Amino acid sequence: MLSFYVHIPYCIKRCGYCDFNTYTPSELQDGATLEIVSNDYIDAVLRELEAAPTDPVPTIFFGGGTPSLLPAQDLGRVITAIQARNGLTTDCEITLEANPDSVTAEKLAEYLHVGFNRISFGMQSAKPHVLAVLDRTHNPANVEKAITMARAAGFKSISVDLIYGTPGESLEDWRETVENALSLDIDHISAYALIIEIGTKLAAQIKRGDLTMPNDDLMADMYLLVDQMCEEKGLTWYELSNWSKTGHQCRHNIAYWENKNWWGLGPGAHSHIDAKRFWNVKHPTTYKQKVFSGQSPILDSEQLTAEQLKDESILLGIRMRDGLQIELLEPHQLEVLAVYRENGFVQLQEDRVILSPAGRLIADRIVREITI
């Protein structure tokens, strides 16, 4: 099996916290409109596809950037090409990331028609002042409207992404955001702690003292709150930052966490095939020049050792509700986990080690201690 990630590196505006490999029209060297860019870019992606393995495909994920800025027929060309070349499993999950203000009822119907069956909206917050700090272009009303239209169009699985820990966001603000999200017709929530990336507008504002980040205690309270509220509404956690109704887990992301094979198409996209990782050149113009001239867009690669693969299995597995298989762990690692178990951070269930809610708050620390 081979999953595909398709990177769409275009946005109308760069959000203040964003450090992703994405570009606005003014940042593009070719200066073209998105409509012109779209055709040219999809041609390049299809050219890169020719180098990928031909195994059947269980999941495709279009991320960015803002994939929903591009016409459905252009994204559909990629789905059609993968289907013709590799074949899709009968239950293939095909996800579109979308901004709430970039979709219409007509566009959503078109996305469904070309093969998408799952959509993930970047909601981030239900509080206007939080959205303003994040530099988001939508308002809370856009989110409800977009989700209603997506369900009416026929999307069977709808997710929203939330961000907590924005400067100026209180615990009550966060509670209202989660309540708002859970009141919508959704099947899945991802909630991520805001990470301040060097070089972003938000990082500069914090460095100047214009904004102040919340403390660790508030961040912990926010995580525990979303976990509790989701569980009460029937959305069960299955990975540190993800909750879903039964049958609505993001199978594409699970493929990442289970170290399955995937191929990333597009500039800056990463791939993982067996024990090898590789990644493409970052800028869309350089990427297109490479593939149109018959060169590989791969910038660099890394062959993972058996020890690195094992550490990755621990790093990724401990994030999951199913936890870590005890057989993966050495005696000294089990000794470390025994201390955390005594303090209520991990639980032993049959042949697995599973993080408690408190343990999820310090998952990175636990991983560091058992993989050093």
Image: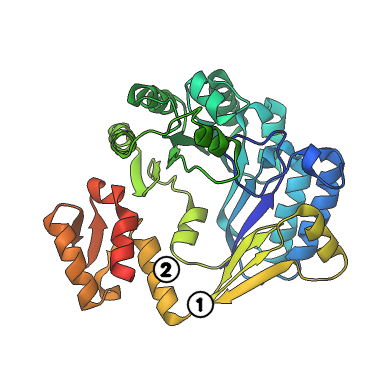
Question: Residue 371, position in %: x, y?
Answer: 33, 70
Q: Residue at x 34, y 37 (%)?
A: 219
* Identity of the residue furthest to the front in this view: 208
Residue at the spot x=31%, y=54% of the render? Answer: 363
Q: Is residue 257 left or right of residue 43?
A: left
Q: Earlier in the sequence, mark 2 or mark 1?
A: 1
Kind of residue at disc 2:
Glu
Q: Is residue 250 left or right of residue 153?
A: left
> For the point 60% across and 44% down, which residue is it?
199
Q: Name which residue type carries label 1.
A: Leu
Q: Position of residue 42 (x, y in %)?
A: 79, 52
Judging by the rendered image, the residue that carries numbered circle 2 is 312
Please tell me whether mark 2 sits on a helix, a strand or a loop: helix
**Whole-percent x, y for residue 115 in the image:** 66, 46
Are circles 2 and 1 on residues that touch, CB within 8 Å? Answer: yes
- How far apart are the alpha carbons under marks 2 and 1? 10 Å
> Residue 141 sits in which quadrant?
top right
Judge whether residue 358 can be spotted in this image.
Answer: yes
- The correct choice, above or below, for 88 with respect to 136 in the image is below
Closer to the camera in the image, 38 or 71: 38
| 361 versus 218 height, above or below | below
* Residue at the disc numbered 1: 304
